[in-house]
Image (spheres, coloured by chain):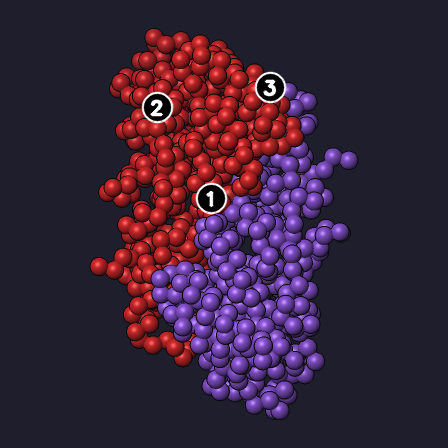
Chain colours: A purple, B red
């Protein structure tokens, strides 16, 4: 059977839905705005996108806004199993067509050829756990704060405290790459010296995702430096690097790739996270940011949990491409229970910045409190009950709770 | 003096504007949601983003939506002259903050260090004109239609007709890359054979921008094939390739780069075209799509003209980075006069697909009519007057006009 790509959208329009759907399908395949010589029926049968449309909410009267579920389907032969060209086909010129009031990609289904063409995550959940020596339970992590402004020496001093405090995972802020205040190479050398020494003593190597976002040759060279220094992860910003740059880097990479989604604020106008994360997982990220419950941004909890579930849902029968969802943004001990209740998975990275550093008992108390909150959640012990027997947790609740 | 990056936004919020601006500036520099150890005043002075905010439309009452012009300013030292990291800083996590109702980047100003770090367009306007042997007047061009579905042989046959018809410029549709129906290599070989033969006879080589969007190694190899076959341009989709992939390709490229903006429909929720095109021009595109007057999409004419003006406005005193704006989307003889009246520049590529192929007199008549419309516009001859003495133009007006 011919392999096809399908994409489902939420379409709103004041126009005739069949006419609008047909226009979109034409724009994204063999159509143009007038019938032209060469547009014969055989060609259309071969290359045209087909569509299916059903109402979600009918317009109240003619000319009022109607909501529809639109599914487009393309023959793989139009583009081949190419992620950059997939983006053009499923998320190219279609949004701007005049009868379209709004259009958002909800989900995609890719034929098997895509699974064969891309590597997927090299480490994923099990590979990340192995490198961190955390066989189960969420990875407790943090973002170096302040976001930007610390020197490399300051950063390494903070990493030393975090290692002593028993952290599993550290990442750079997405704003921290290779500015002159904190150059990448110096940061990696100084921080890895600390992490290696701690690993020698403790037998556990803290995973630090160094933000190597930049030009491709820089990213490759920085990756090799992290590797040479014994580092176990790198981080990059997907919307800055882009799909082609990511794929070129992925072929070079021998470390887990921690993917930051900054810029999601504009990308989300056309993409649901459920659709978007599939492309990046297939391309080969290992950790995907999903925001967090009761976050400091606008996203609601349902959306956050749907994103995290998506990251943990296999993509192909023989190629799951499952990745670690990364919870962050205003996360504290107050979010462990609601996150666990809704996600029912321990396979996640839980990042707290202020929610760790601002613990009144210091950084070690901050790490302990976070771990206590997750232990309680997973064991089914209410937060208030756990707080009675765990001082750090009690102090954290007094500082950060309740969620407003 | 310390070099700084500045970015201006249109912000709408129901919240206190100073508080919101301060939150955004903090999120995008040295802030976090609680004050943490290490956030000393010296660090803040060094790394914090500063801001300036002024009302565009004050809220009618407390809690109503206010419109503001917000300018953020960062020290270059936070990130260095890196375009991928610039995107994180100016268009990263800021859009999603809770008090932000909407936020759109209007314009950016980059310090001189960016001009030194990136190549800019290698060909730009004069280089493109030289390769096309069109010293002045708009380049009359077309997109191979149907968008996708033609074989390489069919495409070459159409190119032969277009060459005979006197076209200046041809491009692939953005959906046409390397699908199995029309493989890239075969398309380039067959089309360039036609173009070379025509150039030998006519002394003018038609510029064909072959869409090489794909993985980086594919793009480099495809570029080299186009070059070896005597081709004079390549095309790619900026939002699929992304900034890092583009920059890696740009270093390899020895041909003009025709930049397609498909996906702009979602990017525009966070970026004005005026801001966005600056990054890509500095990175080194030669032609930038700007949509067209009375287009088939939602964009209004003011916005289209502002985009085209931006492409023609120098970026740095010693590095103009000016590029050819590319007009397309439902363009016909009816758009020459209004485009000229508002742009007052001949430095543009004018693409008609259906507006050329569907001319009742055939393709040569279609090209002639487009050229006649532009000659008339630039000479100050009204369209109706020119139509009296030019049959092809008259037929085109009967077919395509008036604009509804």
| Secondary element type, mark 3 | helix
Q: In the picture provided, is A11 more to the left or to the right than B394? A: right
- Measured as percent of width and height from the top left, residue B201 is found at 44, 9
In contact (CB < 8 Å): disc 3 and disc 1: no
From the image, tell me which residue sits under label 2.
B130
- Measured as percent of width and height from the top left, residue B359 is found at 48, 15
- Measured as percent of width and height from the top left, residue A91 is found at 55, 43
Looking at the rendered structure, whether the residues under marks 2 and 3 are on a common chain is answered as: yes
For the residues labelled 2 and 1, the Cα–Cα distance comes to: 26 Å
| Camera-nearest label, 2 or 3 | 2
Could you say which quadrant of the image residue A70 lies in? top right
For the residues labelled 3 and 1, the Cα–Cα distance comes to: 33 Å
- Examine the rendering and report whether any part of residue A53 can be seen: no
| Secondary element type, mark 1 | helix
Kindly identify which chain the residue marked by label 3 belongs to: B
Q: Is residue B280 above or below residue A213?
A: above
Give me the residue at 64% from left, 44% from top: A7
| Camera-nearest label, 3 or 1 | 1
From the image, tell me which residue sits under label 1.
B248
- Examine the rendering and report whether any part of residue A252 can be seen: yes
**Residue nearer the viewer, A178 or B168:** A178
Q: Which labelled disc corresponds to residue B154?
A: 3
Looking at the rendered structure, whether the residues under marks 2 and 1 are on a common chain is answered as: yes
Give me the residue at 70% from left, 80% from top: A379
């Amino acid at each position: 059977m011919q392999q096809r790509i399908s994409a489902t959208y939420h379409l709103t329009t004041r126009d005739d839905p069949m006419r609008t759907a047909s226009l979109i399908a034409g724009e994204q395949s063999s159509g143009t705005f007038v019938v032209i010589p060469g547009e014969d029926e055989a060609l259309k049968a071969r290359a045209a996108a087909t569509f299916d449309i059903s109402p979600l909410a009918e317009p109240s009267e003619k000319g009022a806004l109607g909501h529809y579920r639109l599914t487009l389907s393309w023959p793989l032969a139009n583009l081949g199993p190419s992620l950059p060209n997939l983006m053009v086909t499923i998320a190219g010129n279609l949004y701007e067509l005049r009868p379209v009031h709004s259009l958002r990609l909800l989900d995609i289904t890719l034929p098997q050829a895509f699974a064969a063409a891309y590597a997927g995550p090299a480490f994923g959940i099990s590979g990340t756990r192995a490198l961190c020596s955390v066989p189960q339970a969420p990875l407790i992590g943090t973002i170096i704060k302040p976001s930007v402004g610390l020197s490399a020496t300051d950063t390494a001093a903070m990493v030393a405290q975090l290692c002593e405090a028993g952290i599993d995972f550290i990442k750079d802020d997405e704003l921290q790459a290779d500015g002159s205040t904190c150059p990448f190479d110096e940061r990696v050398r100084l921080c890895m010296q600390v992490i290696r020494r701690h690993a020698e003593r403790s037998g556990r190597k803290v995973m630090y995702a160094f933000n190597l976002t930049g030009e491709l040759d820089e990213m490759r060279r920085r990756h090799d430096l992290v590797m040479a220094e014994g580092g176990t992860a790198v981080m990059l910003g997907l919307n800055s690097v882009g799909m082609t740059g990511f794929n070129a880097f992925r072929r070079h990479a021998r470390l887990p790739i921690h993917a930051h989604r900054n810029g999601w604020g504009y990308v989300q106008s056309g993409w649901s996270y459920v659709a978007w994360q599939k492309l990046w997982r297939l391309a080969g990220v290992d950790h995907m940011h999903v925001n967090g419950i009761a976050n400091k941004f606008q996203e609601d909890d349902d959306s956050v949990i749907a994103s995290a579930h998506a990251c943990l849902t296999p993509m192909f029968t023989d190629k799951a491409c499952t990745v670690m969802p990364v919870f962050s943004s205003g996360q504290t001990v107050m979010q462990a229970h609601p996150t666990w209740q809704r996600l029912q998975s321990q396979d996640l990275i839980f990042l707290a910045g202020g929610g760790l550093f601002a613990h009144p008992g210091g950084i070690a108390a901050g790490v302990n409190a976070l771990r206590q909150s997750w232990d309680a959640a997973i064991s089914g012990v209410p937060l208030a009950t756990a707080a009675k027997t765990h001082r750090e947790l009690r102090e954290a609740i007094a500082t950060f709770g309740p969620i407003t």
